[in-house]
């Protein structure tokens, strides 16, 4: 079964490849001030992730997206900006882990609700439980993050990134 990606509407900042565009010249939103987070292949078909790759994609997306920044889905995202960019203290590391856990818990609830309504996710695509979150401070104001979770099919999925 192929899952469908949620069509999240995103507010557009009109910056594409580090270049600012006027509203009506923006190649991302085409003057609408929002865009749908979906892409298409050369045949014009929507590119859909599936299995553990889809779960990894959603883990990254919820952590990278700034919470309250999307007017269409205000609870989506992560409040990492409260910690990232400040001095790397042990307390900051603990706060960041809590912030990431909260975002992942929210993702899990969204996935479960979507699964119960539409049955479009597979068990490999739904976050089951967090195995561990490893946070290693880098330099003065960024972090190496390693997230390890079990999906609802009891498969281990890991995702690492720097924020």
Image (cartoon, helix red, strand yellow):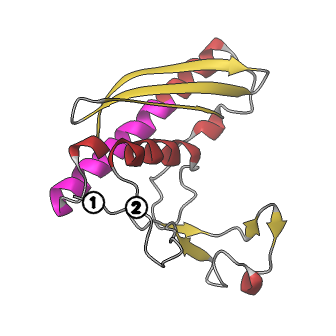
Residue where numbered disc 2 is placed = 48
Which image quarter holds the C terminus?
top right
Most frequent secondary structure within the magenta stretch: helix
Q: Circle 2: is it few (<14), some (14-19), or many (20+) Cα within 10 Å?
A: some
Vertical placement of 46 versus 83: above or below? below
Vertical placement of 110 versus 104: above or below? below
Question: Given the current orientation, which residue lies at the most extreme front position?
Answer: 43
Is residue 106 magenta-colored? yes
Residue where numbered disc 1 is placed = 2
Nearer the observer, 34 or 28: 28
Which image quarter holds the N terminus?
bottom left
SS class of the residue under badge 1? loop
Q: Circle 1: is it few (<14), some (14-19), or many (20+) Cα within 10 Å?
A: few
Q: Which residues are magenta?
A: 99-118
Is residue 5 magenta-colored? no
Q: Residue at x 51, y 43 (%)?
A: 60
- On screen, residue 77 versus residue 124, left or right, reads right
**Residue 59's spot in the image, x, y percent?**
45, 42
């Amino acid at each position: 079964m192929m899952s469908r990606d949620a069509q999240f509407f995103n507010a557009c900042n009109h910056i594409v490849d580090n270049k600012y565009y006027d509203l009506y010249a923006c190649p991302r939103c085409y003057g609408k001030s929002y865009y749908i987070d979906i892409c298409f292949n050369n045949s014009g078909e929507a590119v859909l992730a599936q299995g553990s790759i889809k779960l990894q994609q959603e883990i990254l997306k919820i952590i990278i997206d700034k919470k309250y920044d999307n007017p269409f889905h205000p609870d989506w995202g992560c409040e990492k900006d409260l910690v990232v960019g400040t001095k790397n203290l042990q307390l900051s590391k603990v706060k960041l882990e809590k912030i990431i856990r909260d975002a992942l818990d929210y993702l899990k609830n969204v996935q479960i609700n979507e699964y119960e309504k539409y049955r479009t996710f597979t068990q490999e695509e739904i976050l089951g439980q967090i195995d561990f979150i490893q946070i290693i401070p880098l330099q003065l104001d960024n972090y190496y993050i390693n997230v390890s979770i079990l999906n609802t099919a009891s498969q281990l999925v890991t995702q690492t990134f720097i924020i």
